[in-house]
Amino acid sequence: MKDKRILYVSSEVVPYLAENEVSLMSYDVPKMVNDQGGQIRIFMPRYGNINERRHQLHEVIRLSGMNLVVNDLDMPLIIKVASIPKERIQVYFIDNDEYFKRKATFADEEGVMYPDNDERAIFFAKGVVETVKKLNWVPDIIHVHGWMAAMLPIYMKHYYKNEALFSDTKIITSVYSQSFDGILDAEMINKIGLDEVPLEAIADLKNPDYESIIKATIDHSDGIIIASDSLSSSLTKYIESSGKPFLPFVPKDAFAEAYSTFYNEII
């Protein structure tokens, strides 16, 4: 993996949020690449339940300050950064008071999903790309984890398709069983359409439940990793029939070699 540049974009990463299959793999995989001499960057949302003092987050003024347009509204982008203790791994946090100040991740204390989760996902995707452009850091691979990060492949293939910085960048998506109940805002497809994304390319988002969002993400990725042993049969079949290179589920104690091979030889 020496000198390979991989951008990790995740809904959740330990130690900043609780351990689950997404947050753990979003730490373990970058650490593996970092240990093997690769160059990595990790991006995640700065949810309000992340303790900034304990984790020593600080704003990066030179990267903050731009506005992103979501659903025809200008939303200020704030970039924060922290280092994972003992690992010399930097994590960048996409922040905005309107979208990420609330003291939870995806749902309120009653377990009700936030009605603007679709806009939060759009803002996160655009915020990551705009920040990487400012860093002028060219990734060989972008590896996406978790549904809150799932809009990034769509935006890369359409909204940012003419960005020379990413002309040779490949996108891998890890697909997990971790999902949500119900659907996101039914207007999600039209909000994305405002960013010159053809509606026929995201037709699955007419009914934006978990599987529809993941299917749209698969359609816009260059490779897929099945990251859960218990992935639904419908998503598994969709991946297998997609025509995309994919890596079947690999247990955690054996993922390093399989992922390295997928990065280096398949994608």
Image (cartoon, rainbow, N blue to C red):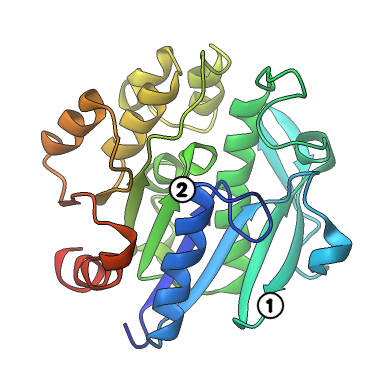
Residue lying at the far front of the rendered structure: 253
Q: Quadrant of residue 14?
A: bottom right
Q: What amino acid is found at the position of numbered circle 2 in the picture?
A: Glu
Considering only vertical position in the picture, is 70 above or below 136?
Answer: above
Q: Quadrant of residue 200?
A: top left
Looking at the image, do the residues carrying marks 2 and 1 touch, with CB atoms under 8 Å apart?
A: no
- Residue at 27%, 27% in the rendered image: 232
Q: To which residue does mark 1 refer?
A: 85
The residue carrying pointer 2 sits among few (fewer than 14), some (14 to 19) or many (20 or more) residues within 10 Å by Cα, namely some
Q: Nearer the viewer, residue 53 or 91?
A: 53
Q: Nearer the viewer, residue 240 or 190?
A: 240
Q: Quadrant of the C terminus?
A: bottom left
State which tag comes first along the sequence, 2 or 1. Answer: 2
User: Gap between marks 2 and 1, in whole Å?
Assistant: 21 Å
**Direction from residue 164 to residue 123 in the image, left or right:** right
Considering only vertical position in the picture, is 243 above or below 3?
Answer: above
Q: What amino acid is found at the position of numbered circle 1 in the picture?
A: Pro
**Direction from residue 81 to residue 158 in the image, left or right:** left
Considering only vertical position in the picture, is 28 above or below 145?
Answer: below
Q: To which residue does mark 2 refer?
A: 21
Residue 197 spot, x, y in % from top left: 43, 31
- Residue at 24%, 56% in the rendered image: 250
- Residue at 63%, 61% in the rendered image: 131
Residue 148 spot, x, y in % from top left: 54, 38
User: SS for tag 1?
Assistant: loop
The residue carrying pointer 1 sits among few (fewer than 14), some (14 to 19) or many (20 or more) residues within 10 Å by Cα, namely few
**Direction from residue 250 to residue 138 in the image, left or right:** right
